[in-house]
Image (cartoon, rainbow, N blue to C red):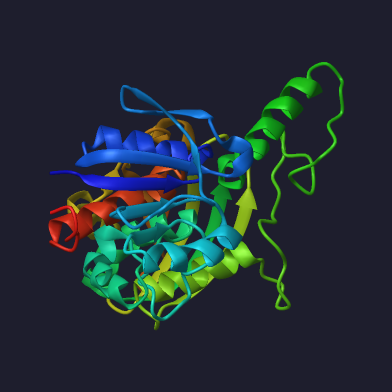
Amino acid sequence: MGYRIAVVGATGNVGREMMNILAEREFPVDELVPLASRRSQGTEVSFGDRTLKCQTLDNFDFSKTDICLMSAGGDVSKEWSPKIAAQGAIVIDNSSAWRYDADVPLVVPEVNADAVAGYTRKGIIANPNCSTAQLVVALKPLHDAATIKRVVVATYQSVSGAGKDAMDELWNQTKGIFVNDEPTPQKFTKRIAFNVIPHIDSFMDDGYTKEEWKVMVETKKILDPKIKLTCTAVRVPVFVSHSEAVNIEFERPISADEARDILREAPGCLVVDKREPGGYVTPYEATGEDATYISRIREDFTVENGLSMWIVSDNLRKGAALNAVQIAECLLNRGLLKKAA
């Protein structure tokens, strides 16, 4: 017997990817219900070989729904996730609304799958920030081996992380430049085509942006609160897949060769690290893939027990939709989906 799954935000980039991944991974779905705002009512979306019409969130009855995959933004989630959970569905939320709530588990299945059991406190499980997800997948096995003290990360984040309008802006600006049509920034603070912008989300009083703060706080919650971490988040003119340049300081010695061997065996990781031209992964190659790719693993001789590496992953998949579906699989595999079973 399968389950009744609702996808809130089904017309967005991540919502559509959630439905694709549910079908790809053959999650046992008896009924899938795509939900969206009133203006998107009736919009057709694909689920496997089926075409479904979106219903409105406002009038939907969740009492017979097993899992709700929520990807409609923080404000919607703050209002609706508790209501949905109160009707008996388990909410897996992709926004930042619940990540920092002590009663809501923040889960990356390759890292802390057992935490899903904590959903019973509020009926909600949080998906981390897209940059955090790929980072902790790579850090976890190394932390287990040598204990991480400090991490310095610079992100190179694709425009898809800011939604479909941001992708359209990059596309239109790129085309416009070739016909001498100087673009006017709308979604971004400056021109994104042929440029990089060291600013994602709002600025905080300490000079960090909210995006940088998310990576720092979420990594501690998922992996280890003792880890010191600093982050610089940068938007780059890439459509899909985030990259990260990561420097790690450990408590115990660990060589580049040891790290490479550990990561080759780690769940969710794929090492592509040849010290030759092209012997590394770029965002273009990671797009559409499930793995977190790790390249350029090398020792940092400026600190004791230091390593540097390059991490790339599809932000719409592992950074969002895939991670949410993997959380649903964890619930299923641990016998926590009781209703339909």
Q: Position of residue 257 (x, y in %)?
A: 24, 55
**Numbered disc total:** 0
Comparing 132 with 151, the one in front is 132
Determine the image quadrant of residue 145: bottom left
From the image, which quarter does the N terminus lie in?
Answer: top left
Q: Position of residue 77 (x, y in %)?
A: 52, 61
Does 81 appear above or below 243? below
From the image, which quarter does the C terminus lie in?
Answer: bottom left
Q: Position of residue 296 (x, y in %)?
A: 39, 47
Does 14 appear above or below 183? below
Q: Position of residue 5 (x, y in %)?
A: 32, 46
Q: Judge left or right: residue 321 versus residue 231.
A: left
Query: Farthest residue toward the top?
Result: 179
- Can residue 157 be spotted in the picture? yes
Comparing 42 with 214, the one in front is 42
Residue at x 28%, y 46% (from the top left corner)? 4
Q: Judge left or right: residue 309 versus residue 152.
A: left
Residue at x 56%, y 46% (from the top left corner)? 161
Comparing 184 with 51, the one in front is 51
- Can residue 241 be spotted in the picture? no
Residue at x 32%, y 61% (from the top left corner)? 90
Q: Judge left or right: residue 96 versus residue 199.
A: left
